[in-house]
Amino acid sequence: MKLITSRDNPRLKTIRRLAQDSQAYRKLGLVWMEGDHLCRAALSRGVKPELAVFSEAIWQASEFEWAQCAEEVWVVPDDLFSGLSALESPSKMGFLMTLPSTPDLDPQAATVVLDRLQDAGNVGAILRSASAFGFKQVVAIKGTAGLWSPKVLRAGMGSHFGMGLIESASLDDLKGLQVPLLGTDVHEGPFLHELIQQGKLPRRCAWVMGHEGQGVSPELMALVALKVRIAQPGGEESLNVATAAAICLHASATSN
């Protein structure tokens, strides 16, 4: 364990940049994750961070539990840790790790395709649902919020470490998928619950989730094999994209 007290420490400056700039991980090739739950999830998936950083208060209470969690362990004063974080309520511990390499596209994997989603909370929530329902691959079209940005990581609650994540993908990349692409549409296609009742909903497929305001691009929708509607008896015009994703992914995961 090493005690660090200088705000000018170069690695702390790097962490501060990663915490406050959602695109910095791409430039630096490093990922910063904050919080007990997220760090535990990483360790449970075999991640060995380069550096673990703890506030003095947390370290004093849990030194023996975390002493071997990373290649290197730093402890910093509580106010210094607060300055590293972009969160309103800093979690007082975090891991610095190398950005995982992008895996090759798995043509047969149950997949979620994200088409230019902008909201980090939505992206993280969809990753969490994808992991929970057994989807093994997420493909983010160029323009989607950064999958390894701090806000997406926190919203994903550890789901990142159980799936293959591919960023900045093109429509040509999707042509390598050998599972059918499914998309939601407000006006066209059979209702999701009817497909379930008829046993016609594919279990292994690629669900396409589109931009919060614009939906799925026409070019990508042209690749979709099946458009599906979600019944809304309450009469709302549309659903939040993360809510729609959870409904669709659960339906496929539990279909016969």
Image (cartoon, helix red, strand yellow):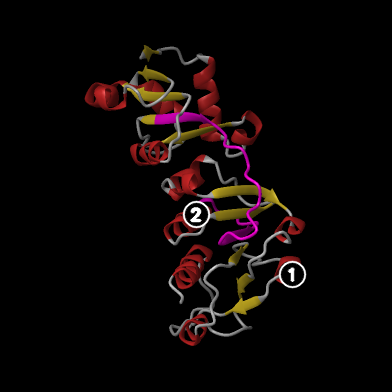
Using a 10 Å C-alpha cutoff, classify the residue at mark 2 as few (fewer than 14 neighbours), some (14 to 19) or many (20 or more). many
Return the x and y of residue 179 as percentages of the image width and height.
63, 66
Cβ atoms under marks 1 and 2 closer than 8 Å: no
Image height check: is 167 above or below 87? below
In depth, the one of 100 and 3 nearer the eye is: 100
Residue at mark 1: 218
Q: Nearer the viewer, mark 1 or mark 2?
A: 2
Question: What label does residue 127 carry, if any?
Answer: 2
Viewed as shown, does residue 169 lie left or right of 118? right
Return the x and y of residue 213 as percentages of the image width and height.
62, 65
Which label's residue is closer to the chain start, 1 or 2?
2
State the extent of the magenta-drawn residues as a range.
94-120
**Residue at point 36%, 18% (across, down):** 75
Return the x and y of residue 80 as percentages of the image width and height.
40, 21
Residue 96 belongs to magenta span: yes
**Amino acid at dot 2:** Leu
Viewed as shown, does residue 1 lie left or right of 25? left
Q: Quadrant of the N terminus?
A: top left
Viewed as shown, does residue 192 lie left or right of 116? left
Spatial CA distance of label 1 from label 2 is 24 Å
**Amino acid at dot 1:** Pro
Using a 10 Å C-alpha cutoff, classify the residue at mark 1 as few (fewer than 14 neighbours), some (14 to 19) or many (20 or more). few
Q: The residue tagged with tag 1: helix, strand or loop?
A: helix
Tell me if residue 118 can be seen.
Answer: no
